[in-house]
Image (cartoon, rainbow, N blue to C red):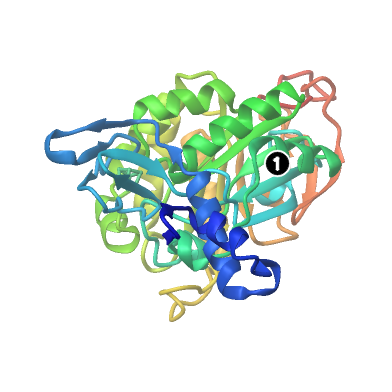
Amino acid sequence: MKLCDRYVSRRQFLETAGIAVAACAVCRDILATESADATLHEADFYEKLAGGSVRCRLCPWQCTVPDGKRGRCRVRENRSGKYYSLVWGRPCLTHNDPIEKKPFFHVYPGTRAFSIATVGCNIECKFCQNWDISQASPEDVSAPFKSPEEIVRLALAQKVKTIAYTYSEPVVFTEYILDCAKAAKEAGLGNVIVSNGFLNEKPLKEWCSVATAIKIDFKGFSQKFYEETCAGQLQPVLDTLKRLAGSGVWFEIVVLIIPPLNDDLDEIKRMTAWIVKDLGPNVPLHFTRFHPDYKLRNLPPTPINTLIKARQIAMDQGCNFVYVGNMPGVEGENTYCPKCKAAVVKRYGMGVLSNDLKNGKCPGCGTAIPGVWV
Ligand code: SF4
């Protein structure tokens, strides 16, 4: 912008012109755009290509992005050959939740998680309950700047145990997670990540270096379902789950059962057999109830019997901790000792009714119950 004989920024122009910017919506928009630019954050996990393009290495799509364009997730942009996260420091949602809502059942039961999300996702599930932010672009949703230190301050003020990166898809705001999580750890807070697991090995390792626990939404056990219902791919998620099993970081799995799309009992049998064989019998597995949403409003909620059968199949295959979610009042909400079968943590919905664990062990027979308890 030219003022007299010199070029000035939009902010300088407005200040020089003496315009009452605080009262003017147009000026506020201009300044907001400028301050968004000021907080642009160079992305991790990309490489520069010839001709000004970049290749994103964050998730398995590995988007090749020409100058001036964005990746498939809409929140990462090539500007003159440099790749930027458009959502670093831009949470569109913050909320204080019970950790059971994520759900984590073996991580600090009965505590709260300060939960944050930015817009964006790298897949598109037709049943997404947060589609208004996961399928949005940064321009679509208000997201005032919050530094990682501000996030930690807010979390501490609310006396939570952890910060949860959740709601939309944390993969696409990885750089922000890593910075918030490091600050959170220094302040004595834990970090939990709720993800679709559709990310590459290197960023997953970075997550593991800061995460207390990771929850993976395992959409189903068929490439067809991933492709047709989620615009995703199965194999990279299987790879992530196997990497997590070898990482030492606590993780839990959620499977949302959506009749008639992924409720085939033989498929659930094969999936749970794979979990036991490749991930181990102690990974908590949550079967949760579908509620009609987004592009699948035509389908009915999951019948309770389907969830109960799925749970039984998983236990028959050798899974030690199988839960039923979005269905308060059923037996599958409690944690049972795999040896003496005592109910060691009792729950109702997202609330913990009682936690009898003694130093992570069954109070009756002394069996260690795996998890992050204190
Ligand atoms: S994170 Fe986004 S830009 Fe990067 S590869 Fe995945 S979809 Fe593409």
Secondary structure at numbered mark 1: helix
- Given residues 300 and 117, the one toward you in this image is 117
Mark 1 is surrounded, within 10 Å at the Cα level, by few (under 14), some (14 to 19) or many (20 or more) other residues, namely many
Number of marks drawn: 1
Q: Amino acid at mark 1?
A: Ile
Q: Is residue 67 rendered to the left or right of residue 5? A: left
Locate residue 366, reporting x and y percent. Answer: 79, 18
Image quadrant, ligand 1: top left
- Residue most toward the left? 51
Q: Nearer the viewer, residue 351 or 35?
A: 35
Percent x, y for residue 214? 56, 35
Q: Tell me the quarter of the picture where residue 184 sits.
A: top right
Decide if residue 198 is in sight here: no
Query: Between residues 293 and 163, which one lies in front from this camera angle?
Result: 163
Q: Which residue in the protein does label 1 denote?
A: 151
Q: Is residue 21 visible?
A: yes
The C terminus lies in which quarter of the figure? top right
Q: Residue at x 69, y 24 (%)?
A: 185
In the image, taking residue 243 as reference, residue 222 lies left or right, namely left
The residue located at (34%, 58%) in the rendering is 230
Residue 186: where, in percent of width, then height?
72, 21
Question: Looking at the image, which residue sits at the far front?
Answer: 5
Q: Nearer the viewer, residue 47 or 123?
A: 47
Mark 1: is the Cβ under 8 angstroms from ligand 1? no
- Is 344 above or below relative to 12? above
Q: Residue at x 73, y 43 (%)?
A: 113
The quarter of the image holding the N terminus is bottom left
Give the side of residue 121 with respect to residue 70, left or right.
Answer: right
Q: Is residue 270 left or right of residue 65?
A: right
Residue at x-position 47% and y-position 24%:
206
